[in-house]
Amino acid sequence: MRCVPDSDHDPRRADQGDHYFTADPASPDERRQLEVRLGGRAVRAWTAPGIFSPGRVDLGTQVLLREVPPPPAEGDLLDLGCGWGPLALTMALASPHARVWAVDVNRRSLDLVARTAADLHLDGLRAVEPDGVPDDVTFAAIWSNPPIRVGKAALHDLLARWLPRLAPDGAAYLVAQRNLGADSLHRWLAEDLGLPTERLGSAKGFRVLRVTRQGDL
């Protein structure tokens, strides 16, 4: 999802030295619109420097979108680490009667997702910081291209916070690059977090993992 070419040597690093997991990016907030296809239709999405993959749908997210089943038609759906929102917007377009939570620590990302959702009249989409999701909400589906580069400990803390909030019949779909620890993440989810985990697919160096609640697989 980029208007201009991404940095191939580190596509998860935001423009001008910011990280995509920076809460308040220091780079100029120069909003622009990006033409992309999401949910089988052409849309114009807002983007800007200082976020993850500001100029295109990144490769990992593309792989995830090709592998996931359609989101549930109703209930609460979560895009964890939403960036400018390709996953959240896809879920909201596909399931207009669901409530979609686009969650990120990067406030610029949240503003961009909210602007695009408003333009597309996606009234069920909520773009919020992590503490903006009520504690009693459980998720019928979680889609995530998680922030691997925050480090293993922080990544594990993030997933341990959100994955146990799957509804009893819910499933999470995660994408991770093989050479950045996808297989070790698979083992940790299954062995340490105790969640049934299977590899749903693999393409272009990425693994897509399906995670369910204990006993639901």
Image (spheres, grey):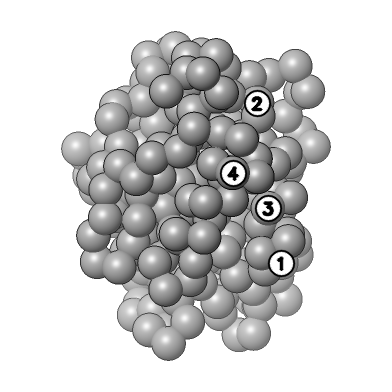
Residue linked to disc 1: 22
Looking at the rendered structure, the number of numbered marks drawn on it comes to 4
Amino acid type, label 1: Thr
Residue named by callout 2: 165
Q: Which mark is residue 106?
A: none
Q: Amino acid at mark 2?
A: Arg
- Whether residue 31 is visible to the viewer of this picture, yes or no, is no
* Left or right of residue 79: residue 86: left
On the image, the x and y values in percent for residue 43 come to 29, 45
Task: Give the mark nearest the N terminus, 4 or 1.
Answer: 1
Instruction: State the residue in front, 120 or 96.
Output: 96
Q: Earlier in the sequence, mark 1 or mark 3?
A: 1
Mark 1 and mark 2 in contact (Cβ < 8 Å)? Answer: no
Neighbours of disc 3 within 10 Å: few (<14), some (14-19), many (20+): some
Find disc 4 in the rendering and name its residue.
191
Residue 202 visible in the displayed image: yes
Q: Position of residue 152 (x, y in %)?
A: 66, 64
Residue drawn 47% across the image and 18% down it: 216
Write the residue at 64% across / 73% down: 19
Label 1: state its secondary structure: loop
The answer to which of 87 and 216 lies nearer the viewer is 216
Quadrant for residue 16, please give it. Answer: bottom right
Q: Which label's residue is closer to the chain start, 2 or 1?
A: 1
Asked whether the beta carbons under mark 1 and mark 3 sit within 8 Å of each other, the answer is no
Name the disc covering residue 156, or none.
3
As shown in the figure, which amino acid type bears the numbered disc 4? Glu
Residue 210 falls left or right of residue 108 = left
Quarter holding the C terminus is top left
- Tell me how far mark 2 sits from mark 1, CA to CA: 25 Å
The type of residue carrying mark 3 is: His
